[in-house]
């Protein structure tokens, strides 16, 4: 696995999300009380960008802006309908003030699976 430098940690303060690209894959970065999470940015129900949705830092989840499904950021689990498939999760770490995201997701995105 390799790590890709995506941004300064100062650009993603607690309670915010950002869309980044990791080797062409859209990734939603989220800062939950200082802990960074990286999940695939495309909702597993439809073609919606999760980073354009809403972060719920109290429960560590993101709400899809299109139909309102919630996903848990720590493991990508789909928590509420209409989404049922888990989101891929990416390794993320901070080194010397930079956010690094791993290139290998936990699972393939369902839209990438034939
Ligand atoms: S596109 Fe995300 S819940 Fe439908």
Image (cartoon, grey):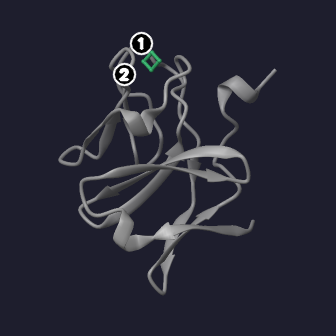
- The local crowd at label 1, few if under 14, some if 14 to 19, many if 20 or more residues have their Cα within 10 Å, is some
Residue found 57% across the figure and 61% down from its top: 91
Q: x%, y% of residue 26? A: 60, 43
Q: Badge 1 is on which residue?
A: 82
Q: Is residue 70 above or below residue 28?
A: above
Cβ of disc 1 within 8 Å of ligand 1?
A: yes
Please report contact status of discs 2 and 1: CB closer than 8 Å, yes or no.
Answer: yes
Residue at left 59%, top 41%?
Answer: 88
Image label count: 2
Q: Which mark is residue 69?
A: 2
Percent x, y for residue 106?
63, 48
- The quarter of the rendered structure image containing the N terminus is bottom right
Secondary structure of the residue carrying tag 1 is loop
Q: Position of residue 28 (x, y in %)?
A: 48, 46
Which of the two labelled residues, at mark 2 and mark 1, occupies the earlier sequence position? Answer: 2
Q: Which mark is residue 25?
A: none
The answer to whether mark 2 is within 8 Å of ligand 1 is yes
Is 98 in front, or is 105? 98
Locate residue 110, reporting x and y percent: 67, 26
Q: Nearer the viewer, residue 93 or 13?
A: 13
Q: In the rendered view, would you say 22 is above or below 62?
A: below
């Amino acid at each position: 696995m390799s790590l890709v430098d995506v941004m300064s940690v100062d650009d993603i303060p607690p309670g915010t999300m950002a869309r980044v690209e990791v080797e062409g894959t859209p990734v939603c970065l989220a800062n939950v009380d200082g802990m960074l999470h990286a999940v695939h940015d495309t909702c597993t129900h439809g073609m919606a960008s999760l980073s354009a949705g809403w972060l719920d830092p109290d429960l560590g989840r993101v709400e899809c802006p299109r139909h309102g499904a919630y996903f848990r950021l720590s493991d990508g689990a789909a928590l509420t309908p209409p989404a049922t498939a888990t989101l891929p999760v990416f390794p993320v770490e901070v080194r010397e003030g930079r956010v690094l995201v791993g290139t290998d997701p936990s699972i393939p995105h369902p839209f990438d699976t034939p």
